[in-house]
Amino acid sequence: MSDLAFRNARIVLGDEIIDGSLAIANGSISDIAAGASALGDDLDGDYLIAGLVELHTDHLENHYRPRPMVFWDPMAALHAHDAQIAGSGITTVFDAVRIGSDTDMPDMAPHVGKLTGAIAAASAAGWLRAEHFVHLRCELPSHDVIGQFETYATLPLTRLASMMDHTPGQRQFRSLDAYKSFYQTGRTAEELERYIADRMDDHARYSAPHRTHIAGRARELGLALASHDDASIEQVEQSVQDGVAIAEFPTTLEAAAAAHDAGLAILMGAPNVVRGKSHSGNISATDLVRAGLLDVLSSDYVPFALLQAAFALPQRLEGFTLPAALAMVSGNPARAAGLDDRGEIAPGKRADLVRVRLVGDIPVVRGVWRQGQRVS
């Protein structure tokens, strides 16, 4: 790893922004100094921020299955995804891979194998710009989720599992009207009612025992565990009992407050911030920031939304600082996932860095470095 230095940068630290310079040695940040310097590459007054850490993005699956029943080569899909991830300033990404079959995807197992296999092979060969880990999105009401979990939970790159339940009438889809709007495409009214009834039957049969099994195995394996779409105090209490560390996408203020009181890291979608609302009609992420109840942002389905939301929040909320906003997309998710070597610009931390310039209200990525090596 070659040494590198930058000067004339607006460096975003943990609690302040300084105009100064930064030096890198052996892939780590070796020095930060305020004021003018004659050494290093001139960043022309651009921001220099810590590389973003993404805990939950479905974007790889979108490249792999760009249309219903159209499946792309998994390695090609991964490289397209990786290029967009790095180009959005994300240097560490947990690729969410759904496990558990249903009527839309009646045999998920081979697809999971192809995606995780591509991530492992490309990571080992050093072909990827960002560092990739695997996040298993466990759909609890699925009949085969346990078998798939046991197959992929022990992979070296699997570091996070989330327990999900998209049964109509609860959690993300407490409103049946919202559920019907989301899932009605390609179904008649009668087919949709049958589909809803089948999902409720699956929930009653599988959800509780599968939750118990996955939570227990995650503890045994040392995997970080996340809940998904908690909507009530009772559901948060269940998550705490399960050993959950991250509360993904709580759908109500009540649930978010309970998760906060329990010490869980609360994660919401950056597209929710950018759009100003949830696509499912649930609580606004910006409202949670106002209430002091948000720790982590995730790009979810739009990679660039992570950086865009971080720069938008200080513009919208009086007194909310850029360092605090950027912590939600770098230091906080890194700590929540147990990655204490990154996520902050500080001596000794990994030199995962992003050069950003504001063009109007939009942050434009002008350079990305992972452990001091330029990747975008």
Image (cartoon, helix red, strand yellow):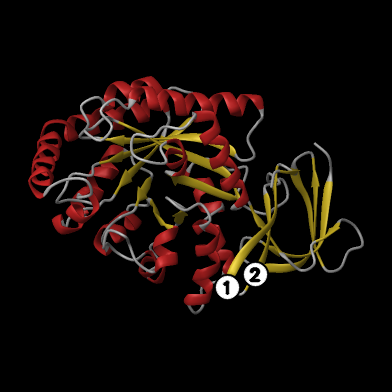
Label 2 secondary element: strand
Question: Can residue 294 be seen in the rendering of this structure?
Answer: no
Question: Can residue 262 be seen in the rendering of this structure?
Answer: yes
Q: Up-down: is 136 above or below 30?
A: above
Q: Which mark is residue 361?
A: 1
Q: Residues within 10 Å of mark 2 (few under 14, many from 20)?
A: few
Residue type at the position of mark 1:
Asp
Give the residue displayed 17% in from the left and 51% down from the top: 170
Q: Position of residue 113 (x, y in %)?
A: 42, 23
Q: Nearer the viewer, residue 17 or 203?
A: 203
Q: Please state, as top left, top right, bottom left or bottom right, where the N terminus lies in the image.
A: top right
Q: Which mark is residue 40?
A: none
Please tell me in which quadrant of the rendered image residue 187 appears.
top left
Q: Position of residue 250 (x, y in %)?
A: 30, 55
Residue type at the position of mark 2:
Leu
Q: Which mark is residue 358?
A: 2
Q: Residue furthest right?
A: 38
Please tell me in which quadrant of the rendered image residue 12 appears.
bottom right
Q: Is residue 191 left or right of residue 178?
A: left
In contact (CB < 8 Å): disc 2 and disc 1: yes
Q: Position of residue 300 (x, y in %)?
A: 42, 50
Q: Position of residue 135 (x, y in %)?
A: 43, 36
Give the residue displayed 63% in from the left and 35% down from the top: 128
Q: Nearer the viewer, residue 101 or 184?
A: 184
Q: Is residue 254 left or right of residue 76?
A: left
Give the residue displayed 53% in from the left and 73% down from the top: 314
